[in-house]
Amino acid sequence: SAVISQKPSRDICQRGTSLTIQCQVDSQVTMMFWYRQQPGQSLTLIATANQGSEATYESGFVIDKFPISRPNLTFSTLTVSNMSPEDSSIYLCSVGEYEQYFGPGTRLTVT
Amino acid sequence: AQKVTQAQTEISVVEKEDVTLDCVYETRDTTYYLFWYKQPPSGELVFLIRRNSFDEQNEISGRYSWNFQKSTSSFNFTITASQVVDSAVYFCALLAWDSNYQLIWGAGTKLIIKP
């Protein structure tokens, strides 16, 4: 299984600002996934990021709000833009063809 | 449409009791995969098991066991002789080709093991 790290592990941000979350994998992977998990809820897929192509966003998520970069096969970033308190969540990246392996998550609080 | 239902929102048992977490799924695909994940209070999601639709054998791993029954579209998870460290939220998930290669997640079951 892949080892995945995320930075930052947590942050407290003011509304209207942006935060970029980094996801690093210890091996080359084709697809990376970004999820949001709101407090006490299940996981919601934000987008799938393939290297060399635009990320594919799920319904309810748009590129202007959650731009994603995937510059190579081991790294991706997710930016949460123009944040509001409703963006307070855990953001997780994952990799895997069948079962997915997850990073430790980024706990974001927007005040 | 694909769907995963974990009807038990929260379960609380005393340590050493056995506990079963239910998972019922819906898919029209004949080829699909089912998964269980554990999310302890630390927040990290831990993969526990994958089962494909062609393998209905039950799986046992230590105190954990899984019962897959296609006839009832269920993939239940039993913890035997529960321990406080088993306290976590457990998620069941489904991967089917007609879900555009996305994991479909259940709502999760919060398991509390009291000492």
Image (tube, rainbow, N blue to C red):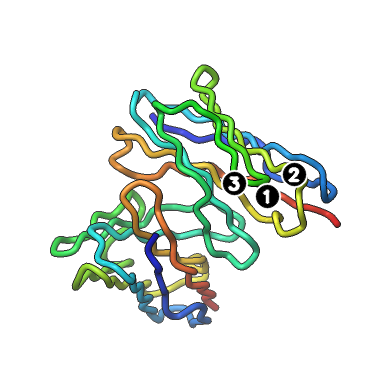
Considering the image in quadrants, where does the N terminus of chain A appear?
Answer: bottom left
Whether residue B94 is visible: yes
Q: Which numbered circle lies on residue A92?
A: none
Q: CA distance from mark 3 to mark 1?
A: 7 Å
Element type where label 3 sits in the image: loop
Task: Name the residue at 63% across, 52% down.
Answer: B89
Q: Does residue B72 appear left or right of residue A32 in this picture?
A: right
Query: Which chain does the residue under circle 1 lie in?
Result: B
Find residue A73 and report its horizontal and vertical position in percent.
Answer: 22, 67
Instruction: Measure the alpha-carbon separation of dots 2 and 1.
Output: 6 Å
In screen coordinates, is B57 left or right of B83?
Answer: left
- Marks 2 & 1 on one chain: yes
Q: Is residue A42 above or below residue A90?
A: above
Task: Say which amino acid is labelled 2.
Answer: Ile
**Mark positioned earlier in the residue sequence (2 or 1):** 2
Q: Are marks 3 and 1 in contact (CB under 8 Å)?
A: yes
Residue B94 vertical placement versus B110 (above, below): above
Write the residue at 45% across / 80% down. A8
Spot occupied by residue A100 in the image (x, y as percentages of width and height): 40, 53
Residue under label 3: B108
Marks 3 and 1: same chain? Answer: yes
Residue position for label 1: B110
Q: Amino acid at mark 1?
A: Lys
Give the chain letter at badge 2: B
Viewer-nearest residue: A93 or A28: A28
